[in-house]
Amino acid sequence: MRLAGRVVIEEFDCEALRDNPLGDPARREIPVYLPPGYDRSGRRYPVIYWLHGFTGTGLGAANYNPWVPSLPELIDRVIQEGAPPAILVMADGLTKYGGSQYINSSATGRYEDAVKELVGYVDTYYRTMASRNHRGLNGKSSGGFGALVVAMRNPQLFGAVASHSGDMYFEACYKPFFWKDLDHMRKHGGLEGFLKAFREAPKKPDDMMHAAMNSVAMAMAYSPNPESPYGFDSVVDPESGELIESVWTRWLEWDPVSLVERYAENLRAMRMIYFECGSRDQYNLHHGARILHRRMERLGIRHEYQEFDDDHSAVNYRYVESLRRLCNVLKA
């Protein structure tokens, strides 16, 4: 991977994640892409923050892969093609069960606060344009969800946001899989046995990984309960499989298609909102994206939505669309 810019790996000691409930590390390795010319000039640069998807890491976003372009390669490309230069910071939201959704939870830790703390850290140690007008948030899948939600809740920090295949319309992306996940957990004797098996498995098969993501990590994010033996409330009854409506309602309160109305004024203040999804997404996220697009139109929120002919996997080649737009709108 030959870049015109360069990547620095920061050792970020995050106060917000210290003593988190899962015992995940508070120190995170954060790749920071510095654009061409950064080391030779005294100028300040806008910053784009990237939130990775479920089971990913900041380091993973920066890793070289001959078949799938990395984030540094992609932003390097758009800058070489003429986009204004920007710093790109690849955050880390990994947890023991795969992800945090970048929100604060008593079951996982304060990951929304961690993103905000990272902004302060980068502004301290790099020559940034430390203003919402020159700061953007971007991400894919769970990171696309996180980008939209963190940006709309923190307009004082972020002035532009982009999302690729972000989690939304929970009725379609999570709910259809609850009962398959429950059947898998029963193979391990229920939730407690499943959690133990997941932690100890030297190799985690796809059905185990999906159950951990869809029915454990999401419950930790959306329905935490410090009084529960597991730190969260399950969304279906472990014996009967009946949907627990009171818990499901708590999940739906975090759905971007619902949040858009609550945070409409904050979203109207964004300099740019861009989101997209493949038309064959395996998790039905294209339906959620279409609904979000329609609701934003109805609310008079300026945005751009694109749909492309692909699914959810290995769509890194699409990230140039958001990176180019963010570089242009966040420039000096």
Image (cartoon, rainbow, N blue to C red):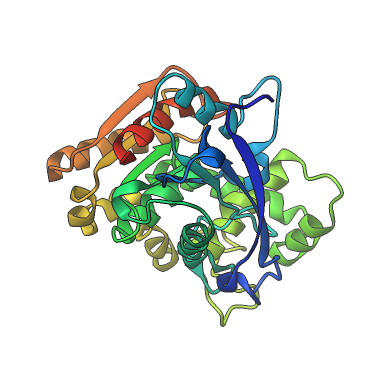
Q: Residue furthest bottom?
A: 227
Relative image position of residue 19 (x, y in whole percent)? 66, 77
Residue found 40% across the figure and 68% down from its top? 246
Residue 55: tell me if it is visible. no
Quadrant housing the C terminus: top left
Residue found 67% across the figure and 59% down from its top? 28
Q: Nearer the viewer, residue 10 or 38?
A: 38
Relative image position of residue 32 (x, y in whole percent)? 58, 46
Q: Residue furthest right?
A: 202
Q: Nearer the viewer, residue 171 or 107?
A: 107
Q: Is residue 262 left or right of residue 115?
A: left
Q: Nearer the viewer, residue 116 or 220?
A: 116
Quadrant housing the N terminus: top right
Relative image position of residue 254 (x, y in whole percent)? 38, 58
Which image quadrant is residue 329 in? top left
Residue found 71% across the figure and 62% down from its top? 190
Which image quadrant is residue 250 in? bottom left
Residue 290's place in the image compared with 220, above or below, is above
Residue 106's place in the image compared with 306, above or below, is below
Q: Is residue 25 left or right of residue 213?
A: right
Q: Nearer the viewer, residue 66 or 221?
A: 66
How many labels were placed on the picture?
A: 0
Relative image position of residue 225 (x, y in whole percent)? 53, 76
Residue 53: tell me if it is visible. yes
